[in-house]
Image: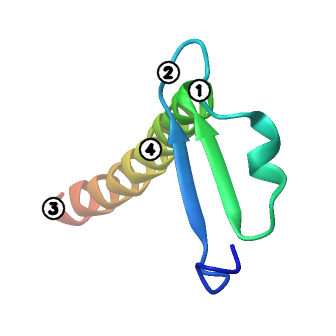
Amino acid sequence: MKARKHRPLLLIDLSVPRNIDAEVGLLENASLYNIDDLEAMGRQGAQARERESARCHQIIDAYVTVAWERAR
C-alpha cells in the first residue's frame, strides 16, 4: 500500500474456490468482494427497486384517482 501511496484498492474475486485470501479485505484502504458478495448486492438492489416501484404505483394511483374525480 505504501508503494500505491495509500490509494484505495478494490479487489473482486470471482473464482470458486477463492483465489484471494479473505484477510486481504482487512488491509487499510483495501476492499475485497467475492461472487457471493456481488450476488447479495444485486439481490438488495432488486429488492430496493421493487419497493420503489410499489411506491411509484401508489403515487400514480393517487393522481389517477384525483384526475378521475375532477373529470366527473
Q: Do tag 1 and tag 4 residues touch (Cβ < 8 Å)?
A: no
Q: Foreground mark, 3 or 4? A: 4
**Nearest to N terminus: mark 3 or mark 4:** 4
Q: Do tag 2 and tag 3 residues touch (Cβ < 8 Å)?
A: no
Q: Secondary structure at mark 4?
A: helix
Q: Foreground mark, 1 or 3? A: 1
Callout 3: few (<14), some (14-19), or many (20+) C-alpha neighbours within 10 Å?
A: few
Q: Foreground mark, 1 or 4? A: 1
Name the residue located 15 percent from the left edge and 61 percent from the top edge.
71
Callout 1: few (<14), some (14-19), or many (20+) C-alpha neighbours within 10 Å?
A: few
Q: Foreground mark, 2 or 4? A: 2
Q: Residue 9: where, in percent of width, then height?
A: 58, 65
Q: Nearer the viewer, residue 40 or 5?
A: 5
Callout 2: few (<14), some (14-19), or many (20+) C-alpha neighbours within 10 Å?
A: few
* Mark linked to residue 70: none
Q: Secondary structure at mark 1?
A: loop
**Nearest to N terminus: mark 1 or mark 4:** 1
> Which residue in the protein does label 1 denote?
19
Of the residues shown, which amino acid type is indicated by label 4?
Answer: Arg
* Mark linked to residue 49: 4
**Nearest to N terminus: mark 2 or mark 3:** 2
Residue 70 in which image quadrant: bottom left
* Mark linked to residue 71: 3
Residue 47 in which image quadrant: top right
Q: Do tag 2 and tag 1 residues touch (Cβ < 8 Å)?
A: yes
Q: Nearer the viewer, residue 10 or 63?
A: 10
Callout 4: few (<14), some (14-19), or many (20+) C-alpha neighbours within 10 Å?
A: few
> Which residue in the protein does label 2 denote?
15
Of the residues shown, which amino acid type is indicated by label 1?
Answer: Asn
